[in-house]
Image: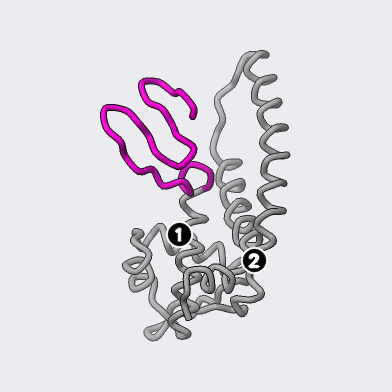
Amino acid sequence: MIKYGEGTFLLGGYYRGDRMKKVNRIDQIGQPRFRIAVHALVWLAQKECVCSSKAIAERVNSHATFLRRVLATLSQAGIVEAREGREGGYCLKKSVEDISLSEVYLAIKKQECEEAKSKAQEECDECGLQLDQRLEEIMVVGEHLIIDYLKQFTIADIMKDIQLK
């Protein structure tokens, strides 16, 4: 249990404030892009055909523009294939057995890092710079642990675990 402000985060993914509310744990520990990417990949694997971004967005409960950015990243990483034209859309470029969650995570993370570099950062005082540097060191170690853990799982594993196709 972790105290934060007026509420309490329970390790099971709940927040207690005025009332109990379920919190999506993946949004607490990962990027929304990662979650949407995995959902889209599972759905593409189920469909086994070219699907429009609109159809995928509706299925994974995402805005189509946001989803297209995620899929463009996965396309650049060689995970999905983007087909243009009237009958265009997206399909898997690799088998689900060959797509690890770490590969998806790293593709999404790479894109986010490139976007962050392009944004201007505010200047910090010396203490702020040291704090940022130390936090970065801690986060790098944590992220390496996450990536190593995600290497164990593929999209096929996820589909099997939730009993899909």
* x 57%, y 55%: residue: 108
| SS at mark 2 in the image | loop
Task: Check disc 2 and give the amino acid type.
Answer: Ser
Q: Which residue is mark 2?
A: 100
The span from disc 1 to disc 2 (Cα, nearest Å) is 15 Å
Q: Which residues are magenta?
A: 1-30
| Corner quadrant of residue 101 | bottom right
Q: N-terminal of the two: label 1 or label 2?
A: 1
Residue 127, position as x, y percentages in the image: 66, 13
Q: Secondary structure at mark 1?
A: helix
Q: Which is more toward the observer, 64 or 145?
A: 145
Identify the residue at horizontal 46%, vertical 68% (top origin): 40
Q: Residue at x 49, y 37 (%)?
A: 11
From the viewer's perspective, tell me whether residue 145 is left or right of residue 83.
Answer: right
**Residue 132 tag number:** none
Question: Number of callouts in the render?
Answer: 2
Looking at the rendering, which quadrant does residue 104 occupy?
Answer: bottom right
Judge the density around disc 2: few (<14), some (14-19), many (≥20) Cα neighbours within 10 Å: some
Q: Which residue is mark 1?
A: 36
The structure residue drawn at horizontal position 72% and vertical position 46%, both measured from the top left corner, is: 144
Name the one closer to the observer, 27 or 57. Answer: 27
The percent position of residue 10, horizontal first and vertical second, equals: 45, 34
Mark nearer the viewer, 1 or 2: 2
* In this picture, residue 98 sits left or right of residue 17: right
Q: Are marks 1 and 2 in contact (CB under 8 Å)?
A: no
Residue 93 position, x and y percent, is: 59, 79
In reply to whether residue 134 is colored magenta, the answer given is: no
Q: Is residue 160 above or below residue 19?
A: below
Task: Give, as a three-letter code, the residue at label 1.
Answer: Ile
Check residue 21 for magenta coloring.
Answer: yes
